[in-house]
């Protein structure tokens, strides 16, 4: 029971924080900027301005799949429910739980928008990169963490440390035969 509560604390804690920040930021943009309005924020890198812009997207991240909004809504709901079911069964790697929790919060953030208004509010513009939101950022950061975690986060590897088998353990034990038999 304690493991279950700890798992859900991570999922609802980190995922809920992403969901809350995503929804608050989108409401701020929707109420303070006219659709299409742009506000420059930072010009620290030449030709890569960072701006706030009130934009919308009925597809998935980066404007892909504009006609698939209903499918993405259903997929997001299925993912969110599925994650609640499987999250307690995941391994104990902190990076795995953290990454999937923020991904869950990001997915829910965009699902809430789709259910509420039929599209997702986007507002972060960086250079020529497609406009995105905090939910999209959380989803992409989680994918990066998952990839890096798989590469670097596993205990052991080829060193024979905890989490892997030594060559002697991996091979089946050969039958012991006495030289006199």
Image: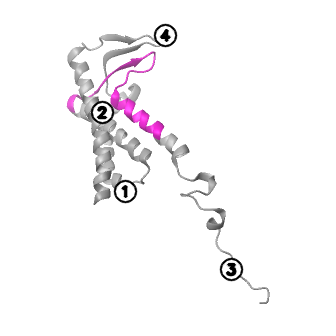
Can residue 70 be seen? Answer: no
Give the CA distance from mark 4 to mark 3. Answer: 70 Å
- Taking the spot 43% from the left edge, 12% from the top edge, the residue there is 49
Question: In terms of secondary structure, where does tag 2 sit?
Answer: helix
User: Where residue 175 is drawn, which disc sits there?
Assistant: 3
- Taking the spot 63% from the left edge, 53% from the top edge, the residue there is 158
Q: Is residue 101 magenta?
A: no
Q: Position of residue 31 (x, y in %)?
A: 20, 18
Q: Earlier in the sequence, mark 2 or mark 3?
A: 2
Which quadrant of the structure image shows residue 180?
Answer: bottom right
- Taking the spot 45% from the left edge, 38% from the top edge, the residue there is 143
54 shown above or below 114: above
Q: Residue beneath label 2, please?
A: 110
Which quadrant of the structure image shows residue 69?
Answer: top left
Q: Residue 158 vs residue 98: left or right?
A: right
167 shown above or below 101: below
Q: Residue beneath label 4, please?
A: 47
């Amino acid at each position: 029971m304690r493991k279950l509560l700890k798992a859900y604390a991570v999922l609802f804690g980190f995922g809920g924080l992403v969901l809350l920040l995503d929804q608050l930021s989108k409401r701020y943009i929707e109420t303070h900027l006219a659709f299409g309005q742009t506000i420059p924020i930072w010009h620290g890198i030449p030709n890569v301005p960072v701006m706030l812009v009130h934009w919308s997207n009925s597809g998935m991240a980066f404007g892909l799949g504009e006609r698939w909004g209903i499918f993405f809504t259903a997929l997001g709901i299925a993912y969110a429910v599925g994650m609640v079911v499987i999250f307690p069964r995941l391994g104990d790697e902190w990076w795995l739980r953290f990454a999937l929790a923020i991904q869950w919060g990001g997915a829910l953030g965009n699902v809430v928008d789709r259910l509420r208004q039929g599209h997702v509010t986007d507002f972060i513009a960086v250079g020529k990169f497609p406009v995105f939101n905090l939910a999209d950022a959380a989803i992409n950061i989680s994918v990066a963490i998952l990839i890096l975690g798989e590469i670097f986060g596993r205990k052991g590897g080829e060193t024979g440390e905890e989490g892997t088998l030594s060559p002697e353990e991996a091979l089946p034990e050969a039958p012991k035969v006495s030289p006199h038999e």
